[in-house]
Amino acid sequence: MTTRSTIADRGRRAVRLLVLLLALAMGWPTGARADATSLADPLAPPDFSSPRATLETFIDEMEAGIRTYYEGNLGAMRAHAGRAFAALEPTSVGGEASFVEMADRTLMLLEVLARIDLPPPADMPGAEEVAESGMTSWTIPGTELRIASQPDETENVADFLFTEETVLRIPEFYRLIQNLPARGELGRYQGIVERFRRGPGFAAPAAFTSFIQSLPRSWFTLVGELALWKWTALVTTLLLAIAIYILGFRLADRIKRRSAVAGHRVRWAGAARSVLALVLAIVTHFLLLDVFGITGMPAAVVGVLLTIIGHLAVAWLIFQLLNIAADFVIQVRELGVASLDTQLVRLVFHLASVLLGLYVLVHMADRLGVPVTPMLAGLGVGGLAVALAVRPTLENVVAGFVLFADKPVKVGEFCLFGDKMGTVEAVGLRSVRVRGIDRTVISVPNAEFCQMQIVNFTRRDSMLLKTLIGLRYETTSDQLRLVLVRLRELLIRHPRVAIEPARVRFVGYGAFSLDIEIFAYVTTRDFSEFLAIQEDINLRIKDIVEGIGAGFAFPSQTLYLERSAGPDPKQAEAAGQTVERWRKENRLPFPNHEEQFRYELADTLDYPPKGSPAAQASV
């Protein structure tokens, strides 16, 4: 019966602990005050001018910090503790060493000092002895605790601090003397490290502290460097944080997969997961180190892990937010989905996210104690070798920016490059992708594409119509003149042919034909429409040639077995009469028509021609 009641009592206590942990995670009012510091002169720096001053300053600040902690003045406690931390060489405090970790280490140093025979203050080197003898270091007699001066930028003797080697060996010194009795005035601090490790952290509210003090003594048994209740809180908090993140991840993933949700909401779901991971990392770090007071190796491992998670969450959040910003800019500027400007906006925001992400990673390395400056210097030297190795890739990247700036082609434009032609589908950071006329995808490196002669068909304002027709040698001179006139009138009258520089010229005598060149610009950019207009003009040319009684020559030899009728005499006579009339009226249109006549004829031809569906639609 007693066993069952004990188990039930422990179960109730465990439930109470879980409920309290949940309340702590959701927020609580702190019972301790965070008043201003109780320093007489807060701006006065701590005195580290000599080994005696450093030792006395460290002990005084630690005593003041412990006293203000028990008084509930956390602001003053942190101020005094910070001044005590300053007595340790700065290189030992870098990385993810939190306030709780430094408090644990300085309390161990205080207990070490309480268990050794400290010399009287008069026997410790003061500022006068240091100035006279030029002393740069001093070791506490009978110990390996060493205090040395730290030269400033001018190599002059500056503050005396506990050396890095001494600070790193404080846990070792503490293990060697923790079973020895305390001596002197510092004896009242005997066992303060164990009390610190068993009790909650500095930021624990009064209700939580009271709850911890009500736990059975078995919960305060040290397992390694932590009390049993702290291990329980550590495991419970980590499991709870993992469970909350998995729940939030699945919820965001469900929102992302919903068919009705699209656009920015998908990216906001990814950003929400990063925010959740960041918040959980911050809250977990605060609970474990500041509220529960996790110390030692577990605190170092958890601190490093949460620091990495938090920084990675920030880097991914930056990437997501900049993608959202890029979509917003594209939407506001009403850019096309596949336009070159759209790709440039995305490229700029991607580069910004990469640079900010690198800054976050460098900041993470600095927080973890990784020497950033030598690493960056090494990257600078190694980066030169890497740059030489990836020179073609860098050339393509630079050429990509040249394409973005110069814009010889845009996405969706039809162009000729080298011996290939096609429609540009994408201009990337490394290559240009073109859909060929055979529907294959051609990828051309940016550096190579920039060096090519690019013919952009899409940007032409009109299309060239140039053809050579040959008339039979039986065509009379006046028939030839009339054909030239009618063809010129055709180009002038056609509404889809530019008046200038449209021309029709008798260019020479071919091997089997009288050659006439037709040169004009058709006012369209669409190739399919150009073919339709060209077809219409060719049909009208045939009508003109046949209507005048002339004929087209062809490259062949004909054997006549009977006499050919030849050109129609009446049509030839009519053509001659027309030309003769022009000659008498001084209106012979050679070499050109009169300017007034040209503009009177402009756009008088029916196009599309009568009888076609297009002509009916335009009525």
Image: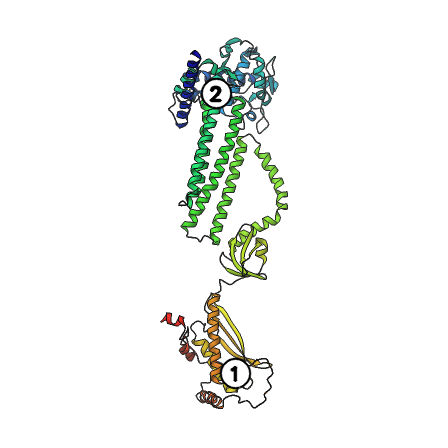
The residue at the point 47 percent across, 40 percent down is: 318
Direction from residue 381 to residue 322 in the image, left or right: left
Direction from residue 178 to residue 570 in the image, left or right: left
Percent coordinates x, y for residue 44 in the rendering: 47, 22
Tell me if residue 589 can be seen: no
Vertical position of residue 218 compared to residue 101: above or below: above
Tell me if residue 112 can be seen: yes
> Which residue occupies the extreme front position in the image?
1
Numbered label attached to residue 359: none
Vertical position of residue 597 compared to residue 434: above or below: below
Percent coordinates x, y for residue 52 in the rendering: 55, 16
Neighbour class for label 2 at 10 Å: few (<14), some, many (≥20)? many
Occupied quadrant, residue 141:
top right
Q: Which residue is mark 2?
A: 230
The residue at the point 48 percent across, 48 percent down is: 346
Q: Which residue is mark 1?
A: 551
